[in-house]
Amino acid sequence: MSIIYTLNKLVDPITARAQDAERQRKREQPQREAEGEPPRYRCRVCGLEAPERGYCPACLADTMEPVARRPVPPADGPDEP
């Protein structure tokens, strides 16, 4: 908190309450990831892709790394003339 925040509450309490309510709403809003396919992993040695992280079933080594996700295509919107 700053001195400006305290002075703002004294000078304009209605606006300060509205700002507090907005901050509270943002804090309580859950942070969600965009839905998509589950993460995939690729072996650095042989290139095998699998849904499990950890040991590669072909190499029997801890060489799995995450594969970059494909970008989500934009939603189809109304066509503009």
Image: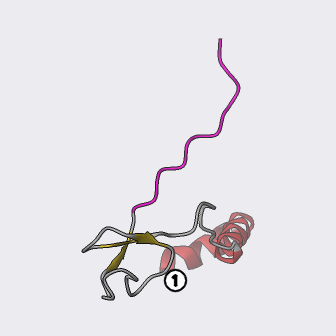
Q: Quadrant of residue 34?
A: bottom right
Picture coordinates of residue 67, whole percent (x, y):
39, 66
Reply yes or no: does residue 71 show up in magenta. yes
Q: Nearer the viewer, residue 48 or 41?
A: 48
The quarter in which the C terminus is drawn is: top right
Q: Would residue 47 be counted in the magenta stretch?
A: no
Judge whether 23 appears above or below 62 on screen.
Answer: above
In this view, which residue lies farthest toward the left? 45
Which residue is more in the foreground, 14 or 80?
80
Q: Provide the residue designation for mark 1.
A: 1
Check disc 1 and give the amino acid type: Met
Which residue appears at 33% of the width and 88% of the height?
A: 60
Side (left or right) of 17 relative to 55:
right
Coordinates of residue 3 in the picture (x, y in percent) = 49, 80
The residue stretch that appears in magenta = 68-81
Q: Position of residue 25 (x, y in %)?
A: 71, 71
